[in-house]
Amino acid sequence: MSLPASDIYRLQSYFYHLPEELIAQEPATHREKARLLIINRERGTISHDTFEHLNDYLPQNSYLIVNNSKVIPARLLGHRLTGGAVEVFLLKPLEDGYSFEALLKPLKKIREGDKIDFGKGISAILENKKECVVRFNKKNILSYLKEVGHIPLPPYIKRADTARDREDYQTVYAKKPGSVACPTAGLHFTEKLISDLKVYGHRFGQLTLHINYGTFKPVECDDIRRHPMHTEYYCIKPAVHESILKAKKDFQPLVAVGTTSCRVLESVAQSNINSGHTDIFIYPGYKFQMADALITNFHLPYSTLLMLVCAFGGYDLVMKAYKEAIKERYRFYSYGDAMLIL
């Protein structure tokens, strides 16, 4: 498939048909046993292996940059005191420490001032219906979510979350709470695999980008350049930033583990600001300044994530790889298989 240059910004160019049964509903039994599709941009080749053999394909002495954001149990199930179930999906904490922007279901049936009880002494009121702001009865509600919250599995996983998801839907290096979706490219790493890769001479560096619900919002503009990109908070420690710059200077291969790590690297490269909010939107035509390779999962049609991957790997080659992955019955999306682009 070769896309005319005039179509690279057309939304329809980022559609592919995926059989529903290829959407992974459960995690792999062993993280490192996930399948790995390898794209070599220089050779224009596509090959197949498993993630446990990642070292066989990484450039020597790679510096892998991972996102250590931790998924919070942001989905709360409660009841109005007047009756009726309510789902509250936390989006953004507000400065007072008690309030959150949130998604509420069913919003139409809830009035401002209605109290929602979540059990275990936790409750909230709908403080502002227009802005969808809820105010909790306790400060710093994040510290109570372990008791009453549910892991916010993506909408394409058609089942309720389980106790196992609290561990499975986190990377082994997650430590900074704040995301409502997992940086899933990192799910394939185990402590042992990381240790083995270090023995082989690779290094790991950590940064943070808290993924918000906007990551699930598909692009709707026919010209993708008009899409209003969501903003997300990021932070990279100055020492890590310095080590990345030194790696680039020394021609050490920089591997972004996930689109989130890639977005932070490119944001910092542009702004030279180590923490803040980024709304960087990467699509074909973008000139990457930092990453030499990318580890990623397979992404939804029309998504900004797919567009970033097409920008990095080349549209024609990436879409060819997706077609082959479907033919080879790869597992797709958050709990699915992985891709390495060299």
Image: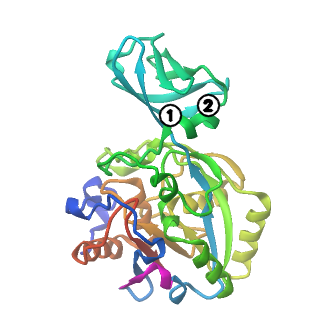
Three-letter code for the amino acid on which mark 2 is drawn:
Ile
Q: Is residue 17 visible?
A: no
Q: Identify which residue, 61 or 161, lies in the foreground.
A: 161
Q: Position of residue 38 (x, y in %)?
A: 41, 81
The verdict on residue 156 being magenta is no
Identify the residue at image location x=67%, y=53%: 271
Residue located 41% across and 74% down the image: 34
Q: Quadrant of the N terminus?
A: bottom left
Q: Give the residue at mark 2.
A: 141
Quadrant position of residue 30: bottom left
Q: Is residue 303 above or below residue 276?
A: below
Along the viewing direction, whichever of 195 and 44 lies nearer the viewer: 195
Q: Which residue is mark 1?
A: 90
Residue 207 in view: yes
- Residue at 62% in and 82% down: 197
Q: Tell me the kind of residue under disc 1.
A: Leu
* Above/below status of 188 relative to 132: below
**Highlighted range, magenta:** 47-53
Query: Does residue 182 sit above or below 32 in this rendering?
Result: above
Secondary element type, mark 2: helix
**Label 2 Cα neighbours within 10 Å, binned few <14 / some 14-19 / many ≥20:** some
Q: Are marks 2 and 1 in contact (CB under 8 Å)?
A: yes
Q: Is residue 226 above or below residue 240?
A: above
> What is the distance, in whole Å, between disc 2 and disc 1 at their CAs?
10 Å
